[in-house]
Amino acid sequence: MAIEVNGKSFETDEEGYLADLSEWNPEIAAVMAEADECDLSENHWEVINFLREYYEEYQIAPAVRVLTKAIGKKLGKDKGNSKYLYELYPYGPAKQACKYAGLPKPTGCV
Amino acid sequence: MEDEEYTGGIEKKIIYVNRRAPHGTVYALESLETVLIGAAFDQDVTMLFLDDGVFQLKKDQAPEALEFKNFSKTYRALEMYDVEKLFVEQESLAERGLAQDDLVVDVELVARKDVGALINDQDVVLSF
Amino acid sequence: MSTLNVLNKSPFEKKTMEQCLARLADGDSVLMIEDAVVAALADTAIASQLESVGAAHALYVLEPDLAARGLSSSSRLAAVKVVDYSGFVELATTHERVHSWL
């Protein structure tokens, strides 16, 4: 599978996760979100950028429980909770936001 | 399988015994991934690094040159997955000219003579 | 609280057996299967080492793996007991845990 962004094609797996995370750019995230009818706000981008930094540091896409805890630590308790994150990413904060961030599907996510 | 009883509520003490150097074989990465996936099931997890397994925790790994993922960074995420019991055998380090300072994470050292007892304190042994 | 340690590598090819034997706890047993069965033979270079381990720990060898290698009637170390598959299963149930050394 592949995704078209600005006339360029990027390879994805069968669930739409980017094959090569080094190819990622913000427009890819925007196109993926549009396909899900999700309007990316500042708050969405905050999670996407957090995930990219997390991956850079630990080489892993965090499980949702770990993501929630880590967001709380970095961005405060009002954001480090399931309610807030599921409102932003109704398909599952780890799964959906990781996809937009160009990361693989979180380890331990079935 | 409708007669099968759901046993997911039982917490077991599981020790992962890691004895292979990383990158040459897939054992180290498989072990780490199993631990991370298993962390969702609220088990009491211990990781033990013996023999060449101590090389898994060596600082400054750069397997990107081989186009392998640098999963040595991931050991530092284990704490966030509530995996906090990391043991390294003292003699295995010394035999390989390594010290605790050479490792990417804080670990507890265990003497060779006490490894058997550490394993015997567990319910399940998984060897990688 | 003993462990059944299962070994399947020849001590003449890999260090696994030596590495396992160095970490046995009191009451632990050792079962040799597949290529590890060669360690059960008498007169090998490691026979005396195995005999001394056998003084403190129960040692077992899996018969079908001896037979497959033509070693069933070869003389064995006195410390080693021979088991068949049902003996293997029994050992697994009479120890609290099984540690298969890779």
Image: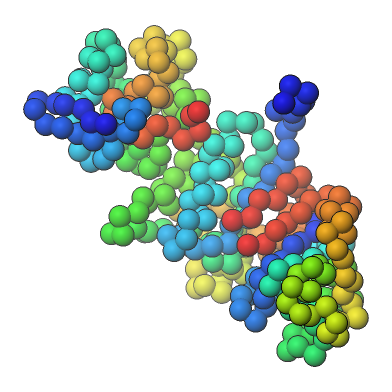
As drawn, B40 above or below A44? below
Q: Position of residue B35 (x, y in %)?
A: 56, 42
Q: Look at 46% across and 35% down and name the residue there.
A: A107
- x%, y% of residue B12? 73, 38
Is there any visible trace of residue C17 in the rendered image?
A: no
Q: Residue at x 51, y 43 (%)?
A: B33
Q: Quadrant of the C terminus of chain C?
A: bottom right
Could you say which quadrant of the image residue C2 lies in?
bottom right
* Residue projecting furthest to the left: A7
Q: Is residue C56 left or right of residue B73?
A: right
Seen in the picture, residue C12 relative to B55 is either above or below; the reply is: below
Count every numbered label the image shows and give the total: 0
In this image, B62 relative to C8: left or right? left
Residue at 84% from the left image edge and 54% from the top image edge: C89
- Residue drawn at the location 39% of the way across and 9% of the way down: A87
Q: How is the image coloured?
A: rainbow
Task: Give whichever of C40, A84 is nearer the camera.
Answer: C40
Whether residue B66 can be seen here: yes
Residue A71 place in picture, x, y as percent: 40, 24
Q: Quadrant of residue B19?
A: bottom right
Q: Is residue C101 above or below residue C94?
A: below
In the rendered image, residue B80, in percent from the top left (x then y), is placed at 51, 35
